[in-house]
Image (cartoon, helix red, strand yellow):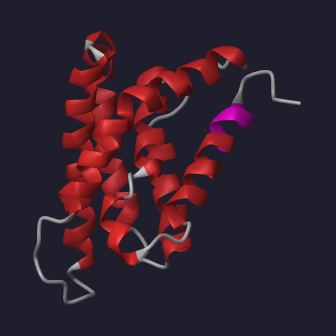
Amino acid sequence: MIAANGRGVIVGSFSVAFLLAVIEMPSWLIWARPEWVTLVLIYWIVALPQRVGLWTAFSVGLLLDALRGDVIGQNALALLVVGYVCVMVYQRMRNYSLWQQALLVFVLVGLSEMVDRWVGSFSQSNTPSLQFLLSSFCSAIIWPWFMLFMRSIRRRFRVN
């Protein structure tokens, strides 16, 4: 039974995103993996900013750090930055067309990836590259269908 306030749907969507974030993929496809956790976070902040906000972004980021084995705070900071921007622009984003939203998602996921790479560079010796933009691009391309799917889930379970 889903909780009356929809908390189970929100937690369930993040759980599925965590699974998709760590599922094994061929090495040639890893750079094109959409940032599922970031997409779910963006969706819930835009849809329900009074329920999902910066604390959620930080908490989900810490869980993602633990799940991926990254430096503690690496994904938390990246998702916190994305969450902050989403909280600031959610009213405008709701009025954008799906493709305009996808462009904003490209920027937000790219920003998240840049912060993630920046923090990761303190502990690892990564060679600078722009391959992370492929993940941002794939996330933006699937955004319209992802958003419509998440909206249908939210309405089906009456999450508000």
Magenta residues: mostly which secondary structure?
helix
111 drawn magenta = no
- Quadrant location of the N terminus? top right
Looking at the rendering, the stretch of residues picked out in magenta corresponds to 7-11
Q: Residue at x 81, y 28 (%)?
A: 3
Q: Answer whether residue 9 is magenta in the image.
A: yes
Percent x, y for residue 25?
Answer: 48, 70
> Relative to 72, does residue 155 appear above or below in the rendering?
above
Query: Which residue is outermost to the top?
Result: 95
Of 148 and 159, nearer the camera is 148
Q: Is residue 15 above or below residue 88?
A: below
Can the viewer see residue 49? no
Q: Is residue 1 left or right of residue 18?
A: right
> Residue at image x 82%, y 29%?
2
* Front residue of 31 and 68: 31
Residue 39's place in the image compared with 146, above or below, is below
Residue 135, quarter of the rendered image: bottom left
Tell me, yes or no, if residue 34 can be seen here. Answer: yes
Q: Residue at x 29, y 39 (%)?
A: 140
Indicate the position of residue 81 as horizontal and vertical percent values: 28, 48
Left or right: 95 with respect to 42?
A: left
Residue 120's x, y, as percent? 27, 77
Q: Quadrant of the C terminus?
A: top right
Residue at 34% from the left image edge and 29% from the top image edge: 87
Between 92 and 31, the residue placed more toward the observer is 31
x, y (%) of residue 146? 46, 32
